[in-house]
Image (cartoon, rainbow, N blue to C red):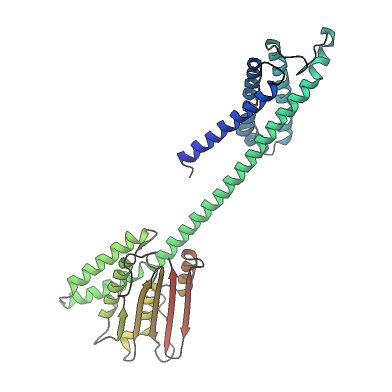
Amino acid sequence: MIGPAFKLKKIALHILFWVGYYLLTFYWFSQVNNPDIAALISLRIVLIHSMLFYLNFYYLLPQLVEKGRYLVYLIVVILILAGIFYLIRFSNEWLPIRENLTFRPLKKPAFFARFFFGRGLYISLASSMAILFISSTYWMNTQNQQRKQQAITLKSENLEAEMKFLKSQTNPHFLFNALNNIYALTYTNSPKAPEMIMKLSEMLRYVLYESNEKKVPLAKEIDYIVNFISFQSLKIEGQANIQVDLKNVDDGAEVEPMLFIPFIENSFKHSKIENTEKGWIDIRLFSEGNKIDLQVSNSKPDGAFVKDQTGGIGLSNVKKRLQLLYPGKHELTMEEEEKSFHVHLIVHT
């Protein structure tokens, strides 16, 4: 969007152009006329040419050339140039211009020749056509810039829409498992139920409101991760083999919301930690300067297993989101071994 400052700058440049044009014509005409006459002639030329410039820029080019009506544009331009010539010739009657500057007076019978021949015609046509050329060049440059800006805006809007779609795939799924866990706690009158309801409330607030921001403090992302792990741990009977290290981070660093949770979610989903004695998960997150380092490892259950098709987010979507958010500023490696899976993500903010 063009702001007031840009518009003022544009107006100032136009004024500067016409002032410079006036001074140039004044200098040229003052060589053969006294300053008063030169000032009047220059003012007349600037007024006529400025009207020609903006008529061409704001009406003729947009209404005729842009719509492909080239022949009509050519005819109109010829008529305008003829009109300018007649206007300059007619106004010369009231200006005491030296004869050697414009036209050498001819006798009345040579009326037709006087209007259509002479140095005045060539000077008028040349200067007017130069103004038309400058106006047309400026218009084409402006149109090109507008098209580029529209392309950038469209790309930005498409990017934002795609980002919202990817985030919408990330956000809702945890709610189902969380509600099931809370239901189980309330059904058994567990004292943890109020605490988990509060955690769920915090997670929903983060997803519905704070995750709409372009960036959030890393501390808020960590809070969401901690609450997510708490809900996942409820499903595990006994002591879960979950190692979490989220201490060595700069809480003030900012990242795009919901950036790390898909990798953590996948570790819980694919390790099957809740129904195997050998399941384990290791999550480490630390930051140094503008670098944020996430390492997630998890066990792999023996044999093939069917992935849940109703929850989670595919790693292909995660990769796409990283490419949109941090082009050339992230490193993602994933290694699958016989009994484990490892993810290493480095983001440069």
Q: Is residue 229 left or right of residue 166?
A: left
Instruction: Give the image quarter of residue 63.
Output: top right
In-front residue for pair 189/95:
95
Instruction: Name the spot of residue 345 as percent of width and height, x first.
Output: 43, 75
Q: Is residue 90 left or right of residue 322?
A: right
Instruction: Name the spot of residue 97 as percent of width and height, x first.
Output: 71, 14
Residue 34 in the image: above or below residue 183 = above
Q: Residue at x 46, y 58 (%)?
A: 161
In-front residue for pair 185/161:
161
Task: Please indicate, yes or no, whether residue 306 appears anywhere in the rendered image.
Answer: no
Query: Which quadrant is the C terminus positioned in?
Result: bottom left
Instruction: Give the image quarter of residue 196.
Output: bottom left
Q: Residue furthest top?
A: 108
Residue 273 in the image: above or below residue 116 = below
Q: Residue at x 37, y 72 (%)?
A: 287
Q: Is residue 233 left or right of residue 163?
A: left
Instruction: Name the spot of residue 49 as percent of width and height, x first.
Output: 65, 26
Q: Is residue 93 left or right of residue 268?
A: right
Residue 205 in the image: above or below residue 91 = below
Task: Please indicate, yes or no, whether residue 297 appears anywhere in the rendered image.
Answer: yes
Residue 75 in the image: above or below residue 302 = above
In-front residue for pair 77/207:
77
Instruction: Name the spot of residue 76 as percent of width and height, x first.
Output: 71, 28
Q: How many marks?
A: 0
